[in-house]
Amino acid sequence: MKSIQAIRGMNDCLPEQSPLWQYVEGAIRDTVASFGYSEIRTPIVESTDLFKRSIGEVTDIVEKEMYTFSDRNGDSLTLRPEGTASAVRAGIEHGLLYNQEQRLWYMGPMFRHERPQKGRYRQFHQFGVEAYGLAGPDIDAEVILLSASLWDKLGIKDNVTLELNSLGSNEARANYRDVLIAFLEKHIDVLDEDAKRRMYSNPLRVLDTKNPDIQAVLKDAPRLHDYLDDESKAHFEGLKALLDSVGISYRINERLVRGLDYYNRTVFEWVTDSLGAQGTVCAGGRYDGLVEQLGGKATQGVGFGLGLERLVLLVEALAKTEQVKSAVDAYLCPMGEAAEGQAFVLAQQLRSQLPGLRLMCHCGGGNFKKQLKRADKSGARWALILGDNELAEGLVTVKDLKEGSQLSLPMAELASHLEQR
Ligand code: ATP
Ligand code: MG
């Protein structure tokens, strides 16, 4: 019979990859904890309208990437393509936002129907943070600093660059929109289908086109920075000063507009040239209008989303990963029938004495050679050998599988011996 395969672009994380994922996820958890952020978990499926209303109808995600289906009641549901909309929805629904400050984080799978390639999948994972109810540039700087702390922790800070821009207030963008549309109309012959379709509904999106002909024309386009309102300018200056104060360098990229409609003022991306075409590892910004747009009382918001697959690829390629541990520290090998019965009990004693120890107990019998092979394969550092001879003398042999050395010691000393390693 033909076997059934996973859905294209949706990956299994196999046992040999999961230690690296756990290491990266652990670094994320440590980082958010050190900034005092709280976790929020929301459903993977939401009403389709939530994403249409927040991300914007004329965006890549809503136009062509969402996994949308009718459920058995005929309601239109969508597998979440990103995390911010759900966080805002939950915040409004449970009264977490109005007149309050929140610093939240989430991690989990997202779904977009894109062409699968390295660093771009149909089910992928994002870690994100969202801060609510804070208006100043200090919180923008904090979420950027939080991401920078993560690069530091993972040993990749020299391989990512921060790009920064300000989109200004809604009014400033509306003024700029008009002059940008007028400019694009003058160059209509150069625009491709995408750009033509977007120039009236969402002209800023034309600025981050990947089409080189349009890029060439855009060199002479009016600049958004010339239209920024004074408050947004002051906000941007404040942010830059705070980043300077903690030694985070950045590159101003006036073309950076982000693919989602809800951003205002600060937008940023962390990019790398170590991943080929999918160079954006982390992206975010301020979205002061979104809460109101989704039916809540006006509340400021700022946050970012980070692609875990791209981060894992980066760490794998660039960082020292000695800290990445296999799933097993010690592998207990009972040789002979009496030892087998004992080993089961001994293993459980060790687990309760040493809660940090990851101990695997051999199952299924077999000779010394076979059991040691299994011990090696488990990735354990130590094989704990319990033969009938050892058993008679109350001893256990500890073999260091990395160095090859071994010693026998009284069973009662085993726990403290392992603890010292
Ligand atoms: P891109 O320009 O690469 O399509 P995007 O602007 O659509 O990215 P965001 O919606 O800002 O991406 O998502 C934040 C991050 O999530 C991205 O910077 C990236 O690291 C990751 N990401 C987005 N789409 C995918 C995907 N299909 N597969 C893997 N990671 C993704
Ligand atoms: Mg995209």
Image (cartoon, helix red, strand yellow):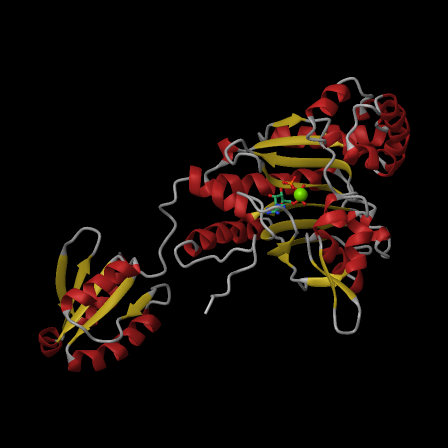
Number of numbered markers: 0
- Above or below 304: residue 378: below
- Residue 51 image offset from top left, x and y in percent: 77, 54
Could you say where residue 409 lies in the image, as x and y percent from the top left?
14, 66
* 100 is higher (above) or lower (below) than 414: above
Along the horizontal axis of the image, is 352 left or right of 215?
left
Q: Considering depth in this image, is 246 or 286 the residue closer to the camera?
A: 286
Left or right of 144 on screen, residue 395: left
At horizontal 86% and vertical 29% (from top left) the residue drawn is: 229
Q: Quadrant of the N terminus?
A: bottom left
**Visible residue check, residue 45:** yes
Q: Residue at x 27, y 63 (%)?
A: 330
Q: Quadrant of the C terminus?
A: bottom left
List x then y, in percent, for residue 326. Answer: 35, 56
Visible in this render: residue 107?
A: no
Relative depth, front residue between 187 and 97: 187
